[in-house]
Image (cartoon, helix red, strand yellow):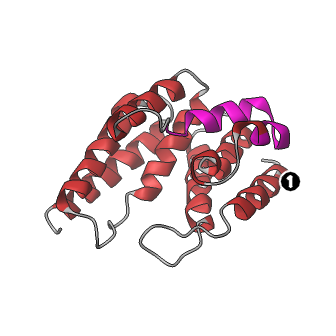
Amino acid sequence: MTQELYQKAMKFAGEKHSEQKVPGTNANYLLHISNVAMEVLMAYQADDSFDLDFAVQVAVLHDTIEDTTADFDEIKREFNSKIAVAIQALTKNESLLTKEERMKDSLTRINELQKEVGLVKIADRITNLQIPPKHWTKEKVSKYCEEAKLISESLQGKNEYLHHRLNQKISAYEKNIDLV
């Protein structure tokens, strides 16, 4: 892994997400980004059959188009077209009517690309399957869990280590449904 690539991506993401917090906390959004990158690094320790430089940059930048002022052209200019296409696939198409349609569309686009893009999506959901924010309803927690199961089903074969981690997190997260 080239540290300069990580540092460049982290600086870009840090600037773009500078005002964003992890939902339900006071933590800067870089906490989430670094956790997704850490999941990718741990997956590489278990199975090094993927492009770590590409995967970590995508992990660090994965929410920049969806959550910041960054757009496809800026990502392409600052990084490259391969990374921009990956980030675009990880970005939900807001013109689709329902959250379910947006997720299915994103998963379809992810599956058309390199496995690294899929493993970043898995790492993202692993990181997000924490104790749900207190203001979430039982229905929202349940739907989020179902969405995680859809991700698990749709992205099989991307990385066995992360797939196993995701399924463990889903099992643990299901316990939260009854606590809401």
Indicate whether 109 appears above or below 175: above
Highlighted range, magenta: 74-92
Measuring from the top left, give residue 178's x and y in whole percent.
13, 63
The residue shown at (34%, 69%) is 133
Q: Is residue 94 left or right of residue 97?
A: right
Q: Quadrant of residue 53?
A: top right
What residue does disc 1 label? 4
Residue reaching furthest to the left: 178
Measuring from the top left, give residue 96's x and y in whole percent.
42, 32
Report the quarter where the C terminus lies: bottom left
Q: Is residue 85 left or right of residue 126?
A: right
Give neighbour class at mark 1: few <14, some 14-19, many 20+ (Cα, 10 Å).
few
Residue 39 visible, this angle: yes
Residue reaching furthest to the top: 112
State yes or no: residue 135 in magenta: no
- The amino acid beneath tag 1 is Glu
Residue 156 visible, this angle: no
- Which element carries disc 1, helix, strand or loop? helix
Indicate whether 58 appears above or below 19: above
The residue shown at (39%, 43%) is 164
State yes or no: residue 76 in magenta: yes
Compare residues 90 and 67 and report the one nearer the observer: 67
The residue shown at (62%, 61%) is 34
